[in-house]
Amino acid sequence: MKGPNARAARQGLWFFLPAGVFLTVILVYPMLYSLYASLTNMRLTSPITRFVGLDTYWSVLTNSAFGSSLAVTVIFLVAAISLEFLIGFALALSFKSMRNTHPIMRALLMLPLMATPVSVGLIWKLMLNSDFGIIPYAGQQLGFGTLLWLADPILAMVSIIIMDVWQWTPFMFLILLAGLEGLPEEVFEAAEVDGSRSFDLLIHITLPLMSRIIAVALAFRVMFAIATFDTVFVLTKGGPARATDLITLLIQREGLVNLNVALASAMSFLVLLMVTAFSAFTFKRVLSNG
């Protein structure tokens, strides 16, 4: 390639180079080092590291704590993301039908998403405090007695689900509303002329047309949710009795508390493989149906 196009291509390469080097340093190198660590018996308490192959992965798969945390994570993901989708979709349909909603209303709905994870955890920890929290107080006034939201295993799981729904429903709302506003109006007008009711429009037109957007939104939400750490760590630290011990909390504990770098790295890569497989399957279905 010669001439102006070649010069522009070289300039583009030089502009990209700093970002490429930066991403390589902060993403690729740590990932490769983590893969190497997962194939060894690396511990920060031991100066000697030797190659053990897939033994560490076998240790993870036979580790009851890993299976328990994985089950807790799946329950959390299914419950939280399902609620986020249902509430977000309902809000998106409401805003779409109102048409003239004020921008301030949308901005207010986005506030939880803009809060930092640690601040979200602290807010909910204060609201759920059994001594002075507003939620236990409201429960008492409604006749439910004193509910120990952060001390009861079931209520603790409910607490982290509610907190996640509060924080991430705006994400679902934003994507689904954008999808709804991009649907062709003439299809709905033709269906209304034929006598279709609102429920029929939702089931037979809106959902089929939105299927790809919904699948992508859910896939991205799963990828984000499986990395949940800060909020749950601040709120429950995985307790009580490991009832909210997400896989990210287990990995952090193995790597930074027990100093078992090899085991933590192997757990991380197994989770990465699961998420990659799920994402690849989802996007393949989306593209094949498109």
Image: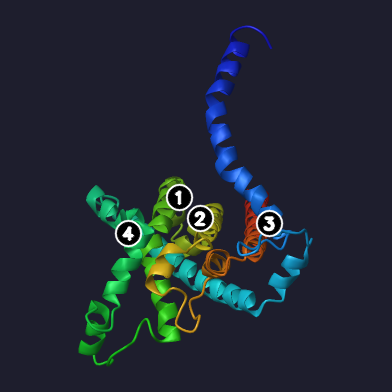
Q: Residue at x 46, y 70 (%)?
A: 80
- Residue lying at the far front in this picture: please name it: 47
**Residues under labels 4 and 2: Cα distance?**
18 Å
**Disc 2: which residue:** 217
Three-letter amino acid code at disc 3?
Ala
Q: Is residue 289 visible?
A: no
Q: Nearer the viewer, residue 263 or 105?
A: 263
For label 1, count other residues whose C-alpha is less than 10 Å away and answer few (under 14), some (14-19) or many (20+): some
Q: Give the label, 4 or 2, closer to the camera.
A: 4
Report the residue marked by disc 4: 112
Q: Residue at x 57, y 15 (%)?
A: 8
Q: Earlier in the sequence, mark 4 or mark 2?
A: 4
Q: Is residue 7 visible?
A: yes
CA gap between label 4 and label 1 equals 21 Å
Residue beneath disc 3: 37
Residue at horizontal 55 percent and vertical 43 percent from the top: 26
- Label 1, label 3: how many angstroms apart (C-alpha)? 43 Å
Q: The residue tagged with tag 3: helix, strand or loop?
A: helix
Spatial distance from mark 4 to mark 3, Cα to Cα?
Answer: 37 Å
Q: Secondary structure at mark 2?
A: helix
Q: Could you tell me how far apart the alpha carbons at marks 3 and 2 are, in whole angstroms?
A: 33 Å
Indicate which disc, 3 or 2, sits on the residue closer to the N terminus: 3
Sequence-wise, which precedes: disc 4 or disc 3? 3
Is the Cβ of the residue at disc 1 closer than 8 Å to that at disc 3? no
Viewer-proximal residue among 188 and 219: 219
Residue receiving disc 1: 179
**Nearer to us: label 3 or label 2:** 3
